[in-house]
Structure formats: C-alpha cells, structure tokens
Amino acid sequence: MHQGASRGGRRPSLDWLRADRPYLKSISACPSDHPMYKLTTHSRIAEIPAQTWNALADPDTPFLRHEFLRAMEDHGCVGEQLGWIPTHLALRDADDEVLAVAPCYLKLNSYGEFVFDWSWADAYRRSGRDYYPKLVIASPYTPATGTRILTGSGDREGAHARALIQGSVKVAERLEVSSLHWLFTTEHETQQLESQGLMRRLGCQFHWRNHDYDSFDAFLNALTAAKRKMIKRERRRVSDSGLRIRRIRGDAVSEAEWAIFHRLYCDTFDKRGGLATLSLDFFQRIAETMGEHLLLVLAYDAGKVVAGAFNLLGSSSLYGRHWGCFRDYHSLHFEVCYYQGLEHCVEHHLQRFEPGAQGEHKVSRGFLPTRTWSAHWVADPNFGAAIRRFLATETEGMEGYIADMTDHSPYRSSDDPASRHGSPRAARDALQ
C-alpha cells in the first residue's frame, strides 16, 4: 500500500496521485470467482491491438471503436490535464489472449460524464475525504447508450462479462479510489452489473425509433395533426430563408469543412462558458480512420457555412453529438440537429436516433422519453448505503418524470409506439 493511502482513512491526495502516478503502472488483478482469468490495465489504448478491440466491440457503438478512443488520446482530448486518465481494462486467459475489454478512465473530476454525481462528491468533501480520483467506464464526453462490457459473441460471453465486472472492482480496490462508475450501459449489462453488487441508477433521455417508415412523410403521418403542422412549418421556414442543407459522410468532408465545423463546435462552448475538449486534429483523424461512421450536417447561407451538426453512425443507430451556429436562424437548430438526422435514419433504415442528452423540446418532434442506465460501486460501505437510499428516492422521481413525459407523446393514439403495449406501465417499459 502506498504511503498515505489508508483503506479506512482519508483518500490519497491528488498531490500523491500525481507524484507517484500509480495509474501509469499496469495492474494485474484476478477476478475472485474466475481464477483462470486475469485483468490488466493499460494507460494507452494502443497497447491493445485495434483489431482485437474492435472485434469485441458492438458495431452499433462507433464512439467505442479503437480509432475513436485512440484519437482522443493522441490529440490531447483526454489525459491528466482534463481529468480523464486512460486506464483501459483487458480480460486475459492463461495464454494471455484478450477475451474482453472495457474503456476505463481514472477521473479527477466529473466533467464530460453526463451522469451527475456532484452531490456525492460534495458529501465526501464535507466528511473530510476526497471523492476524486474515481474510476469511470465510459466513452469520454459521449452520453450515448451502448455496450460497455466488450466481450464479442460466443458461448463464454456471460462468464467473460462476470469476470470483467469482478476484475474492475478489484482494480478499483487496488488503486484505492473512492468509487467505480459504469455509465450509459444497456439494460442487459445493467442487470449483469447489479447481480455483481453494483447499484443501478436510472436516467432519462429522448430517443426516436424507426417503425418501418418508408419516408419522412410516413413518419409525419404518425403524429398528431398539430405536431405534424408544427414540423412542416419549421422546415418551411428554413427552406424559405434560402439556406441550403447538406449531409456529408465523414470520409467525404474536406479539411476546410472540418476546420469550419470545429470553429462552430468551439463557438458553442464559448457561448455557454464550457470547455471545448475535442481538437480539430481529433476530428480530422477520425475522418481518416473511421470516416464511414461519421455524418456531418452543414447549413449554407449564400454559399458560406453558417451552422453544422456532428453525428456518429452505428450499424443500426444514429447518435447526434455536437452543434454550432454562427448566427441565429429561425428553426435551423431543429432542421440540422433533428430533421436531417430523422431523414437519414428513414432513408438508410437505421432503427434508432439518439440526439444527445436532455431536451424536453424533443418530445414534440417525435423523440420519446427513454430510460438510461448506469451502475455504481462505492468503496466506503457507509457512503454506499447512503447512496443506495438516495438512488431509491431518485428512481421513484425519475419514473414519475418518464410517465409524465410519455403522456405528452406527439403520436396519434393508433400510431403511438407506447399504445401497442397495452397498459400505461407496459407502454413506459417499452420505451427502454
């Protein structure tokens, strides 16, 4: 045990963390119920071959591809200065073959996670202890649901998942962090994590599902007359303004267009007082290495780009991520961020569209409340018990919120995705 790091006392200080840098040393941990496996940590994703990582990843989660995560590391989007220190996990057998992986980071803050635990950190601080560092398994700055336990497919998938979960807790204990957090997991993964003792947390976003629409008009016809007219009016305002909209796959975007979009991206953060963590080099790198998984929507006024939205393309889903606009145009945000994405999904038979975190205004435009999940382990049993009580109360409130939002569905009753499942409770459950 490192000096000053007591299991029962105050968490190690950040000064100690930076001085000794234990996260730069590979850790090997044996999952408790699976002695035939070992879990290793990696301070650079390049230590795990891209072909191996991508073969284990879900093809519907481009934000967890090796190329995406490596570009972040190589171009300064993560690291100690931003509080995202790569500590990736790899489950190996006796022959050192990689069986499963997970994107893991030692966190020195809670920025860019979108599962908010500021109150937990404050409670630790008021008790005289440090909440940071902690471990997070996530894709940085990406609040998108998808597989985090990357096991590929096979008859040992379940065993590998259990070993990876147990190993992640062992690593958290070895690093003596306050807690471990798996963010935006699937429902199935959340059940697996909960079965290993982690605490489930419920959130809500607004997602769209494709019910075999053969055109954008077919989607509109599933909405109530009022919502249908609203969307047509918003789209007409954009077209009548003389703006031109283009959808461009990432590998067809020019360097100049990437540079303009990056200015739009940074401008959004400047206006909101945030930190634009993704560099131009990052966007250009992923355009080179995984351009077929990117979709850029650009709006032009008199031949000049005035707005844009960055999306990620999975095998069956579209993920809206970033938006920017140099000047205000009526309804342009809805067109660039939502309607162009919906059209793309219909045209290319994609089944889901996640347009990003939060935003109740999305409901009236066809995006329905959808449960999101995370799972949490806390080292201190007393804090763990308090957080478990908090989560029970929070879950009750979140379920009520989801029910209220579901009642505002814009779909006609006969076309409402929820109405096909009978009772209101079953309808809400269908929106997971």
Image (spheres, rainbow, N blue to C red):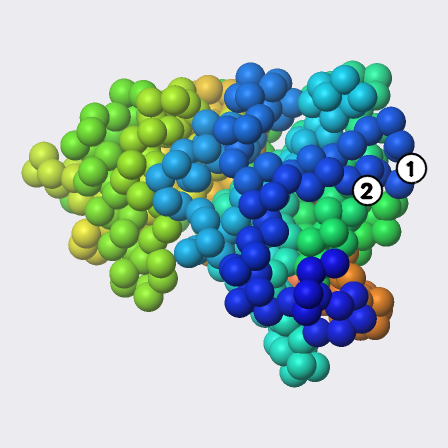
Left or right of 259, for residue 354: right
Q: Amino acid at mark 1?
A: Asp
Q: Position of residue 239 (x, y in %)?
A: 22, 38
Quadrant in the picture for the N terminus: bottom right
CB under 8 Å between discs 2 and 1: yes
Judging depth in this view, the residue of 189 and 65 nearest the camera is 65
Q: Is residue 227 left or right of residue 288?
A: right
- Residue linked to disc 1: 33
Amino acid type of the residue tagged 2 in the rendering: Gln
- Residue 117 position (above or below residue 147): below
Residue nearest the viewer, comparing 159 with 222: 159
Q: Which quadrant of the figure contains the C terminus? A: top right
Mark 2–mark 1 Cα distance, whole angstroms, equals 8 Å
Question: Quick one: label 2 or label 1, which is nearer the N terminus?
Answer: 1
Name the residue beneath numbered marker 2.
Answer: 166
The answer to whether 346 is drawn above or below residue 302 in the figure is above
Question: Hey, which residue is sitting farthest front in the picture?
Answer: 3
